[in-house]
Amino acid sequence: MDNLTVIDLDLRGKACPGPVVETRKTFLSLDKEADEVIITVQLDNQAACLNVTRFAESQNFMVSQEVDAEGMFTLTITRGFSCELPPSEIPKSPCPETPNHYIVYIDSSNMGSGDEKLGSILMKAFLKTLPELENLPKSIIFLNDGVFLTTTDSPEIKSIQALETAGCTILVCGTCLDFYHLKDKLAVGQISNMFEIASLMTGSDRVVRT
């Protein structure tokens, strides 16, 4: 194990998207000659744990998780060990975007500016129409007031669940959920962070804003 790299990261107390950003910096700093890598990451909340796990797996690392009695998470991120999945089963990095790839960005529970009642009607029609399109969005991002659409009280929850079932990735801003005290009411999608959201938006051919 001459080329074994072992790194410990204590990312407790870091606000979103800090944990993902620090993990990415660690990945970039790895010696290219390192055959085997073990990175231990300490985190203090489940949202950060999920975000770091998703990012690490997208970079072809294996991730295992432990949580102690005090709710502290420890992720063990590895690469290069014989006990890991065969290459054909390792999660691959996202493929280059195709010309038809686009993302929908929703930052309000209403569509457009003007009368709120009309905006609510337009948003309902928009979300019901999307699943009928031949070219579905790759991802739908909900931020700010738009996160209310993804909660248990949302009248549009079935439409968004239909989009997720059809293959759209539903990403919901974790900071926004915390701000509105809605994290416990999330009914569809996965909690995301600004690093992931910014990466998707800047890597997409088109961003459609409602």
Image (spheres, rainbow, N blue to C red):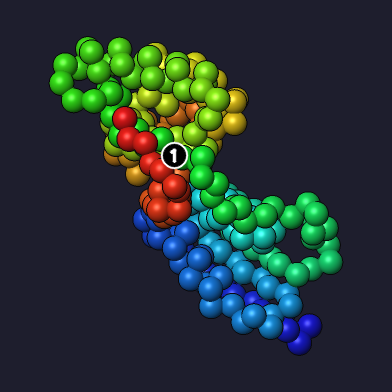
The residue type indicated by label 1 comes to: Ile
Residue at 50% across, 66% down? 24
Give the side of residue 117 with respect to residue 22, left or right.
Answer: left
Most foreground residue, 192 or 132: 132
Q: Is residue 123 above or below residue 28?
A: above
Q: Is residue 107 above or below residue 55?
A: above
Q: Is residue 67 above or below residue 157?
A: below
The picture places residue 83, in percent across and down from the top left corner, at 83, 62
- SS class, disc 1: strand
Which corner quadrant holds the C terminus? top left
Residue at 51% across, 41% down? 101
Residue 11 in sight in this render = yes
The picture places residue 94, in percent across and down from the top left corner, at 59, 52
Residue 46 in sight in this render = no
The picture places residue 20, in percent across and down from the top left corner, at 47, 59
Give the side of residue 86 with respect to residue 46, left or right.
Answer: right
Residue behind mark 1: 103
The picture places residue 4, in percent across and down from the top left corner, at 71, 80
Residue at 41% across, 43% down? 206
Circle 1 crowding by C-alpha within 10 Å: few under 14, some 14–19, many from 20: many
